[in-house]
């Protein structure tokens, strides 16, 4: 009986300790590219949507994530607590150039790519990945 009580007390201590740690310093939100793709695909206006193929949209989003990763805005380190302001680090034109450099398969007008970038930032703000 003493063993059961001791194990319950010990386990509750660790659960409360970890819950407090996550409440005070929550981990970085994870970016689900499939969900991001679906949301942006649904929000594209008809004109832009007709100019971009699904493969090109996927390539644009991959390039977007790569561009953010190069500037330290997206990290694999979930424990990293330093937040970087996206607006002070990147502008849409910089991301556009990075996307074009990373993928030669994209044959889309710059205006369409800029709309996708804008929708991507909107999505990231909605999931609290950016401030």
Image: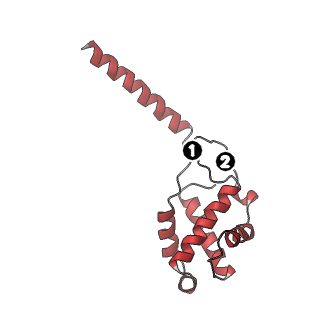
Near mark 1 (Cα within 10 A), the count class, few <14, some 14-19 or many ≥20, is few
Q: Residue furthest left?
A: 1
Q: Relative to 59, is 12 above or below?
A: above
Q: Residue at x 73, y 65 (%)?
A: 91
x and y percentages locating residue 28 in the rendered image: 56, 47
Taking 13 as reference, is 110 above or below it? below
Q: Left or right of 42: which side holds 47?
A: right
Task: Give the image location of residue 73, x and y in percent.
Answer: 66, 54
Q: Quadrant of the N terminus?
A: top left
User: Mark 2: few, some, or many residues within 10 Å (few <14, many ≥20)?
Assistant: few
Q: Quadrant of residue 114?
A: bottom right
Q: Is residue 11 left or right of residue 41?
A: left
User: On screen, 79 above or below 90?
Assistant: above
Q: Please name which of the two marks, 2 or 1, marks the residue nearer to the observer.
A: 1
Mark 1, residue position = 78
- Residue closest to the far top: 2
Asked if the residue at tag 1 contacts the one at tag 2, i.e. Cβ–Cβ closer than 8 Å, the answer is: no
- Please name the residue that numbered disc 2 is placed on: 83
User: Tag 1, which secondary structure?
Assistant: loop
Which of pointers 2 and 1 lies earlier in the amino acid sequence?
A: 1
Of the pair 127 and 95, the residue shown nearer to us: 95
User: Which dot marks residue 32?
Assistant: none
Instruction: State the count of labels.
Output: 2
Left or right, residue 100 beside residue 44: right
Q: Determine the residue positioned at 74% across, 67% down.
A: 94
* Element under disc 2: loop
Report, in whole angstroms, how far the alpha carbon at label 2 lies from the one at label 1. 12 Å
- List x then y, in percent, for residue 76: 59, 48
């Amino acid at each position: 009986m003493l063993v059961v009580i001791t194990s319950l007390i010990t386990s509750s201590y660790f659960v409360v300790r970890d819950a407090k740690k996550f409440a005070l310093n929550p981990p970085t939100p994870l970016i689900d590219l499939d969900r991001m793709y679906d949301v942006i695909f649904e929000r594209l206006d008809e004109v832009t949507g007709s100019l971009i193929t699904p493969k090109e949209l996927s390539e644009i989003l991959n390039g977007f994530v790569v561009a953010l990763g190069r500037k330290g805005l997206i990290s694999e380190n979930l424990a990293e607590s330093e937040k970087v302001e996206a607006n002070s680090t990147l502008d849409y034109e910089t991301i556009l150039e990075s996307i074009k450099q990373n993928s030669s398969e994209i044959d889309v007008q710059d205006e369409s790519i800029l709309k996708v970038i804008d929708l991507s930032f909107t999505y990231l703000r909605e999931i609290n990945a950016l401030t």
